[in-house]
Amino acid sequence: MNKKVSIVTIGGGTGSYVVLRALKNLANISITSLVTTVDDGGIARKERDEFGLLPQSDLRKAIVALSPEDEESTLRELFTYRFDKGTGLEGVTLGNLIMAALSDLEGSQHIAIKKIQKLLNIQGKVVPITKDKTNILIELEDGKQIFGETSLDNVFWDGKKHIKKLQLVPKAKISKQAAKAIKDADFIFITPGDLYGSIIVNFCTQGFKSAIKESRAKLVYTCNLFTKYGQTYGYGALDHIKDLEKYMLKKIDIVILNSGSYHSESLVAYAKENAQPVVYNKNDLGDYKVYLADLLIGDTYSSQKGDKIARSLIRHDSKALKEVYREILNN
């Protein structure tokens, strides 16, 4: 019997969710999802400050993404249910409350995370990148310092300024389970998402660089569809790649890019947010194995009732990504 291919994903939020849905039903693989835990806004602030927990939303999304999508998915639906009214409840996802309650019952968030994964019968593992509570501190190219992950979603400075440096305050160590998963991986999939707030932040944990240096895994990057004001204004695909490599201290092997066309209405909506499609010139990407495909999902995203966070209007199509990933793993 052939050995299962060991896959690690690194990221958070919607990008990680889409990638995990694309990967989970591929044959003969094992998946470990490493999830960022530095969110400090909304419900995450309450979880951190009032309950002493690591932020749970990205962990919950990854667990749900890896759970079976069958007709009897009531439990899965409960974990994604968001309250749209009620003082103190509006905007809160039931899954976060269940995870917090189980953490209290068990006396350990980490035991609770494992039990939730068994409860939802997920196809893989979900692991926090670090067990330490920490925050983002960024320095812009003009020397201005910005504190907190939430600031990256609520830009109050000139978002055309690029980020010169990101660090974690206080310092945080990569979890042992995360480090081992990276060292043992055959493939590491870097998910789309906020380049600094969801991806690079993971690379800044102490021990990450040594773990990925020891790993023989091929590094696969699914590039973002759009730039983001405050993080990647004016960036092309190569700019995204070079920033990732700067913080990983390792070269990416494979890059996945969208070749599909955007509707003019979507471009107008994104332009209002100072965002543009991520452009690329294949001739500039000669050092990488490049996969081009129409990766756009047919419908634009509609927010859930009660969701007060700005979400991406256009997202990667998990089905399209699945076919690209299948080709990569079979080559």
Image (tube, rainbow, N blue to C red):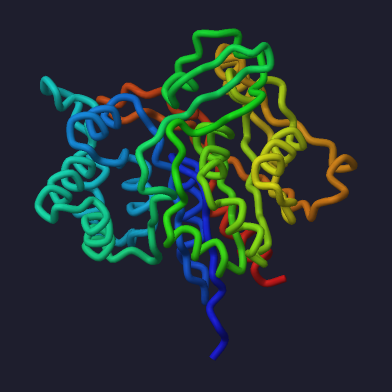
Residue 122 visible in rendering: yes
As drawn, 118 above or below 38: below
Instruction: State the quadrant of the N terminus.
Output: bottom right
Image coords of residue 111 (percent x, y): 23, 59
> Quadrant location of residue 169?
top left
Residue 318 visible in rendering: no
Q: Is residue 126 found left or right of 265 in the rendered image?
A: left
Q: Is residue 27 found left or right of 49 in the rendered image?
A: right
Q: Residue at x 15, y 27 (%)?
A: 89
Image coords of residue 139 (percent x, y): 59, 20
Image coords of residue 248 (percent x, y): 65, 46
Q: Is residue 143 found left or right of 87 in the rendered image?
A: right
Q: Residue at x 68, y 62 (%)?
A: 218
Seen from the viewer's position, the closer of residues 183 and 325 is 183
Image coords of residue 287 (percent x, y): 85, 50
Q: Residue at x 18, y 44 (%)?
A: 100
As drawn, 75 above or below 24: above
> Quadrant location of residue 165?
top right
As drawn, 44 above or below 115: above
Q: Residue at x 17, y 50 (%)?
A: 103
Count of marks overlaid on the render: 0
Q: Which residue ends up furthest to the bottom in the rendered image?
A: 1
Seen from the viewer's position, the closer of residues 164 and 260 is 164
Instruction: State the quadrant of the C terminus.
Output: bottom right
Seen from the viewer's position, the closer of residues 43 and 20 is 43
